[in-house]
Image: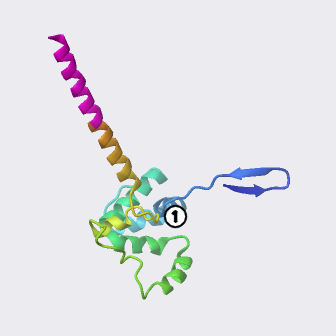
Amino acid sequence: MVYWLTPFLLKNINLKNITLYEYIATNVPSDAHFTINKFDNYRMARSPKELEYQLKNFVKKFGENGLNALAEIHPDKNLLEVNCASCKSSSSFSGNDQELTSPQSRFVNANGSDVLVDDKLRKSQITLSQALIFSGMALIGVAIIMRR
């Protein structure tokens, strides 16, 4: 939580982490649309959320080339270039390939986490669904036995 002190009141501002895709979709939507259409045909996004989804799909499809194309239009491109000069000797994208299923999977979220939150949520929902189905089948079996 960050508190900003203004002359008359104290404001409590909750800052949330945003992904690279959300940042680009919000700050440079026309450049983002132009860039992704250089590689593939995407329809014009109607909202920043839709453009964010298209950018995720774009990087998932084109991997490091797609991420480099987005870095070219990034609003803070100069800052990225300064940091990139120090990492030329050791590629930050080399990572641990044994943990990754495909080369593009490491670029999907681009928020620094190794595990996709959506995958965790999906797996927990599948497990819950399977448990509910099993419970329902067991309840029906008990009802049939009790009926006889």
Up/down of 106 relative to 47, above or below: below
Q: 120 or 71: which is nearer to us?
A: 120
- Whether residue 37 is visible to the viewer of this picture, yes or no, is no
Q: Which of 146 and 13 is in front in this view?
A: 146
Q: Which residue is drawn at 36% across and 78% down?
A: 94
**Span highlighted in magenta in the image:** 131-148
Q: Is residue 92 at least partly visible in the picture?
A: yes
The location of residue 65, given as percent across then percent down, is 35, 74
Against 77, residue 119 (above or below) is: above
| Residue at 48% from the left image edge and 63% from the top image edge | 30
Q: Is mark 1 on a helix, strand or loop?
A: loop
Residue in the image at 47% along x and 50% along y = 47
Where residue 143 sits: x, y (%)?
Answer: 21, 17
Left or right: 48, with 44 as reference point: right
Residue at the disc numbered 1 = 28
Instruction: State the image quarter where residue 66 is shown.
Output: bottom left
Q: Position of residue 33 (x, y in %)?
A: 42, 62
Q: Is residue 97 magenta?
A: no
Count of numbered circles on the image: 1
Q: Is residue 139 magenta?
A: yes
Q: Which amino acid does label 1 sit on?
A: Val
Q: Is the magenta stretch mostly helix, strand or loop?
A: helix
Q: Quadrant of the C terminus?
A: top left
In which quarter of the view is residue 63 placed? bottom left
The N terminus appears in which quarter of the rendering?
A: bottom right
Residue at the spot 28% in from the left edge and 71% down from the top edge: 98
